[in-house]
Image (tube, rainbow, N blue to C red):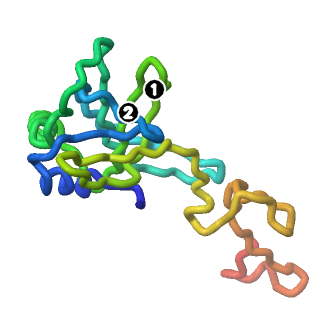
Amino acid sequence: MEDLTWGQFKALLLAHPNLHLQFKYAEDALVDASYHITEIKKAPITSVDCGGVINNWTEIIIQLWEPQGKMGGDAMKVEKALSIINLVEKALTLDAEANVKIEFGNSTFYTRQMYPSAIAVHGNDLIVDLRPDVTRCKAINRGGSCVTADKGEECCTPVKPKVQLIDLAQTNCCEPGSGCC
């Protein structure tokens, strides 16, 4: 699955309001059913990559918290998650095109941000399967590569402006409009 946008994620939730919302963070490991959605973050990001190119994007990060005294039982219903989302959206405009991440950690799993890689219905559960975030080279996304080119230049070398050279021996540089003065 490609990176999921906030609009796509929310549409999937709206399609299954009566299911229980579960998050799978590792092989055979679900966030405990007693979890809470503690906050939803809007993170506008501006960066300059290794090639000197400015990049802008927004991430919507849903933070999950698993209490120490796990209670088991059923996870919250999707409609409860939607009520939290609606509360957040009354105070904060969330961009439908922003990427979605889920932030989670517990005593055996270091806190990290993960992408929803698949969302599927299993019985009475809507399970969001999470995959770790990875570093990415923006040059590859622009059609470049992250290796040294045949000419010895790196993909991350800033773009150099092209300079137009004039052969002064071929021109009369003292004429108006010749470009030499």
Which residue extends farthest top? 69
Answer yes or no: is residue 27 visible.
Answer: yes
Residue at 9 percent across and 46 percent down: it is 18
Q: Quadrant of the N terminus?
A: bottom left
Residue at 24 percent across and 24 percent down: it is 72
Residue placed most toward the observer, 29 or 169: 29
Answer yes or no: is residue 38 visible.
Answer: no
Q: Residues within 10 Å of mark 1 (few under 14, many from 20)?
A: few
Q: Which of marks 2 and 1 is nearer the N terminus?
A: 2
Which residue extends farthest bottom? 170
Q: Do the residues labelled 2 and 1 touch (CB within 8 Å)?
A: yes
Determine which residue is flagged by label 1. 111
**Residue 125, x across and y down, in percent:** 22, 46
In the visual, does 144 lie left or right of 62?
A: right
Q: What distance separates the C-alpha of mark 2 from that of mark 1?
A: 7 Å
Quarter holding residue 21? top left
Q: What element carries label 2?
A: strand
Q: Residues within 10 Å of mark 2 (few under 14, many from 20)?
A: many
**Residue 98, x across and y down, in percent:** 32, 51
Quarter holding residue 64? top left
Q: Which amino acid does label 1 sit on?
A: Thr
In the visual, does 101 lie left or right of 86?
A: right
Determine which residue is flagged by label 2. 103
**Residue 41, x across and y down, in percent:** 29, 34
**Residue 138, x across and y down, in percent:** 57, 55
